[in-house]
Image (spheres, grey):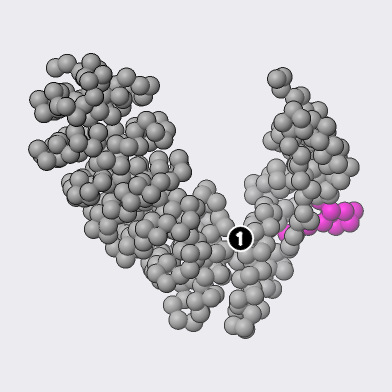
Amino acid sequence: MEAIEVPSHFLCPISLQLMKDPVTIITGITYDRESIEKWLFSCKNTTCPVTKQLLISSPLDNEYDNHHNMMIITPNHTLRRLIQSWCMLHSSDGVERIPTPRQPIMVTRGYVTKLISDAKESTKLRYSCLQKIRSLLESSETRNKSILEVAGAFEYVSSILMKEYSCDRRDKEEALCIFAQFDENEGFILKGLIKNNEDYLLLIEAIIGLLRFGSAQVRENGVKVLKSIYKVADPNQLSNITFDMIVEVVNVVRDNFSNQSTKCALKLLVEINPWGRNRVKLVQAGLVHELVELLVDGLDRRSNELALVVLDQICGCAEGRAALVGHATGLAVVSKKILRVSHVASNRAVKILWSISRYLATGKVLGEMLEVGVVAKLCLVIQMECSPKTKERAKEMLKMHSRVWKMSPCIPPHLLTSYPSN
């Protein structure tokens, strides 16, 4: 089937993609709303990307062109309907119809400043203020996020979290929910709110408290925010993570109350694992057991990959390897993931087994590897399409322990032909 050619006037001049919400600015040029708002309000540009004409003096403080009393950004309903009609006409070719965008919620800096000021004067208004900030953030308007940041909304939200006694739990949970709206690349906003090490410790301690007794949604929000914080943290902060925090994150992995929460927790663990004694602390908190149980229960492809990445990191220390071997199904479940999930999962699983066979190759361990099918799986890896490094590790293991494994009846006869010679 030939590719469908999209009419050029349906494409955004910035993204060069089909416009979902076309809007026209005062220069007469039409853009997709997401692209032009990012240009104006996130990148803080003041000119039209195409004509280079000056639009406004400050993209954060001006919602209207005061000289002409016109909105800077005006929805182009006619073009949107034409695009929707074109999409429907080509639906049989796999083109999806773009939905009608909802009316955006737009605010000014003055509105946000007044909202925060009123909440500071009356504690009764605090929760409703936080709800309004979250609503503005969830509106997906790039401009709103920029205005909230400039107006000091996020500083106010962080102060709610860091106040130990003066704010009730409901306020703190709402504040945490606000920060959980940030995407993975916006940790710099949180980093900018942490003025010193005392602020950092107060913020982490507050999140730990919410994780300890929170609902499933609160705990999911907690690991999201921690992931954002530690993604931009300095080495000293990453190397000195408290055991209490590690226990709470491991508990999120253990409970596995949603795919999203588990993935967030695993991504957080990938960030913190390599630093200091974090791997040993994670082993002490029972993470290896919980990862094996997760892999036994069955996960989606990405969660399987993340779990194996974390397990591979932990097997880089002696305590981690001992914990994996000490689990009744540890070696078996890792072996089972080879050639059944993805290339990434296979590579990590083989590397985990390589660490075990290289540094913990007792007679008992080598015997278990035979019994649960690890050796047979390694023979298959040599024959199948895998990365060169993975095949090299498989061959190295088979050669390393050939005296124990090569003539074992546990290896199917048809695989013995692929067993590497010494």
Check if residue 71 falls in the magenta segment.
yes
Disc 1: CA contacts within 10 A as few (<14), some (14-19) or many (>=20): some
Residue for point 77% across, 33% down: 91
Task: Find numbered disc 1 in the image and state the secondary structure of the residue it sits on.
Answer: helix
Main SS, magenta residues: loop
Residue 141 within the segment the image draws in magenta: no
| Picture coordinates of residue 248, whole percent (x, y) | 36, 63
The mark tally for this picture is: 1
Tell me the quarter of the image containing the N terminus: top right
The image quadrant of residue 207 is: bottom left
Residue 54, by quadrant, is top right
- Residue at point 81%, 51% (across, down): 72
Q: Which residue is mark 1?
A: 149
From the viewer's perspective, tell me whether residue 412 is left or right of residue 348. Answer: left
- Amino acid type, mark 1: Glu
For this view, does 293 lie left or right of residue 405? Answer: right
Residue at point 16%, 27% (across, down): 409
Query: Residue 311: where, in percent of width, then height?
Result: 30, 45
Q: What residue range appears in magenta?
A: 61-72
Of 14 and 40, nearer the camera is 14
Give residue 321's position: percent from left, percent from top.
21, 45
Q: Is residue 201 above or below residue 60?
A: below
Up the image or down, 143 lies above or below 29; here it is below
Closest to the observer: 399 or 333?
Answer: 333
Residue at x-position 13% and y-position 23%: 407
